[in-house]
Image (tube, rainbow, N blue to C red):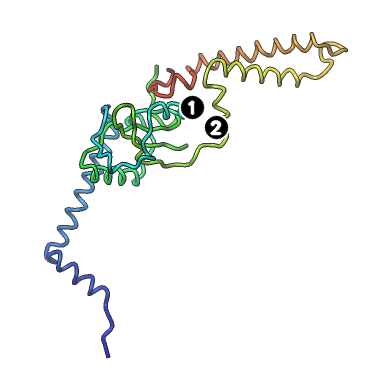
Amino acid sequence: MFPKTNIEKKLAKVRSKQFDDSNWKSVVEAIFKEEEQKDERILQTLENGTPIERNDFILDHLESNNIYHIDQIKKICIDYRLRFLASKYFKGKLPQEALSKIKQLEKVHQTELKGFKIIAPSKLFKLENADDPLLFAPMGNDYYYLIHKWGEDLHPLRKFMMWFFKSFENLIVLTFLVSLLLTIMVPQGLFSKENTSSEFIMIFFFMFKSVAAVVLFYGFALGKNFNTAIWNSKYFNA
């Protein structure tokens, strides 16, 4: 008794009430062009990375769990041997989701965001010669707003492995442990028929000096430094 409802026709009817069908195509093209221009502007800002102290956020529209102080960022970077640098040094690919979130934030806060910074391992940055990026924008007073996280999570043992490179004292502990392990691996009776504590200590000191020499050569030759020194350095051998 009643004709079936054609959803496509209903949808077209709603569109015709809001837009003129004759110029609908040009309206859509203008919208896409405007979005492309926004993407290009944001990418240009990320690549140039002009540093600024703060962005004009509307505090009522911010999510408090995305706000971090520089001291908290520094601690994480040191613990996991990461760097916190301007986006212009980042050589990884920025996902489309990050651009979308930036545009959404700019719309909500009615501003153009600048001064982006990223947390990531050193290998993801284009460092000057002297696993999980996080994109931030400065809020002022050493606070940063987390915009987007992408990529895979860090290895569960990364914090433990990088602990030895936090400071010189930690590196000495690693050298001691490696030397002790190598000393234990020396076959019994290699240097004398009887195993004595004095022989063990002598072998240990020999191993310790050898391992320390290798560590020092590796550190100076490749320009490596401790986590506390590189977390915000743009230099490869800082």
Q: Quadrant of the C terminus?
A: top left
Instruction: Give the residue pinned by disc 1.
Output: 81
Q: Amino acid at mark 2?
A: Arg
Q: Which residue appears at 28% of the width and 31% of the height?
A: 115
Q: Amino acid at mark 1?
A: Arg
Residue 26 tag number: none
Q: Which residue appears at 44% of the width and 21% of the height?
A: 230
> In the figure, is residue 97 to the left or right of 21?
right
Q: CA distance from mark 1 to mark 2?
A: 8 Å
Q: Which residue appears at 31% of the width and 45% of the height?
A: 101
In the picture, residue 168 is in which quadrant?
top right
In the picture, residue 20 is in which quadrant?
bottom left
Q: Quadrant of the N terminus?
A: bottom left
In the rendering, at what x and y percent does residue 8 appear?
26, 73
In the rendering, at what x and y percent does residue 85 appear?
37, 28
> In the figure, is residue 213 to the left or right of 2?
right
**Where 39 sits versus 222, above or below?**
below
Say which element carries label 2: helix
- Crowding near the residue tagged with mark 1, few <14, some 14–19, many ≥20 C-alpha atoms within 10 Å: many
Residues at circles 1 and 2 in contact by the CB criterion of under 8 Å: yes
> In the figure, is residue 125 to the left or right of 48?
right
Say which element carries label 1: loop
Q: Which residue appears at 34% of the width and 30% of the height?
A: 143
Instruction: Give the residue pinned by disc 2.
Output: 158
In the rendering, at what x and y percent does residue 186 appear?
77, 19
Q: How many marks?
A: 2
**Where 32 sits versus 137, above or below?**
below
**Where 64 sits versus 178, above or below?**
below
**Where 179 sits versus 40, above or below?**
above
- Crowding near the residue tagged with mark 2, few <14, some 14–19, many ≥20 C-alpha atoms within 10 Å: few
